[in-house]
Image: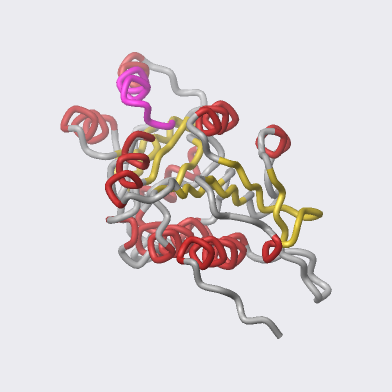
Amino acid sequence: MKNDKNRDSSDKPFRDAVIGRNAVNEALRSGRAIDTIYIQRGIRTGSVLQLIAKAREKGIAIKEADVKKLDHMSGGQNHQGISAICAVKDFAQLEDIFALAEGRQELPFVIICDELEDPHNLGAILRTAECAGAHGVIIPKRRSVGLTYSVGKASAGAVEYMPVVRVTNLPETINGLKEKGLWIYAADMDGKPWYETDFSGPLALIIGSEGNGVGRLVKERSDFIVSLPVKGKINSLNASVAAGVICYEIARQRSGIQSVNP
């Protein structure tokens, strides 16, 4: 199963899980990077409410889960209705992305992942982003995989070098990027072919989710829709593959490499 990919074996807890109320409290108190806290559905006792408040102060995503999921995450240990999944790296700030671009004396190149759920897709995109010269990746706090162990592993180390920013409201973040002069390109069907698109300016590339693609509100805020025409019977590419194709077209144009005419 997809959710098992950060487990050592069926009888061990997730590698990046902190299990139980005291352990989660200490992780919060110590400043350890936490991706998500899972709370057992229906439990809202005093100590759990305090942990939720602390997590919210730190901007940590909080999700409800049934007891079976928490049992699965804890490998049979007593989780007391709460488990935290640690991030493999601290999340960055938007300012870090622009500082990196400025430090390289390059126009900003950002990738936005709109509700990706597969850790291998996000990890692969981080790897491609780092190799193609992007300055950062933005993900939403809700309905998205975070910087889990599986994502870090799939990134092949790129997570250590690529700033990842997690935001509460993706459409508002896009508006903010536009105010900073970035052009917004959404990878979706029925757009202009990627090889006919000018990517030379400061930009953000949006990659949609595995099942639903780019969300409506996000697409409405995009300046351009860019597509990857397909010739087979399947009508779309894997998210990380699509990101790779477009990222390297962006890299080609920015490097001034001319395409070969037939």
The residue located at (60%, 76%) in the rendering is 259
Residue 199 position in % (x across, y down)? 58, 55
- Label count reads 0
Q: Quadrant of the N terminus?
A: bottom right
Residue 105 position in % (x across, y down)? 33, 49
Quick check: is 53 in the magenta stretch? Answer: yes
The residue located at (45%, 23%) in the rendering is 43
Foreground: 16 or 220?
220
The correct choice, above or below, for 179 with respect to 73 in the image is above
Residue 73 position in % (x across, y down)? 40, 49
Foreground: 83 or 112?
112
Residue 218 position in % (x across, y down)? 65, 36
Q: In which quarter of the image is the C terminus?
A: bottom right
Quick check: is 1 in the magenta stretch? Answer: no
Q: Can residue 78 be seen in this view?
A: yes
**Colour treatment of the image:** secondary structure
Q: Is residue 13 visible?
A: no
Q: Residue at the far top: name it.
A: 46
The image quarter in which residue 149 lies = bottom left
The residue located at (65%, 55%) in the rendering is 210
The image quarter in which residue 55 lies = top left
The residue located at (53%, 43%) in the rendering is 144
The correct choice, above or below, for 36 with respect to 201 in the image is above
Q: Residue at the far bottom: name it.
A: 262
What kind of secondary structure does the magenta stretch mostly adopt? helix
Q: What stretch is highlighted in magenta?
A: 51-61
Foreground: 74 or 189?
189
Give the left or right position of residue 128, taking residue 194 as reference. Answer: left
Foreground: 247 or 119?
247
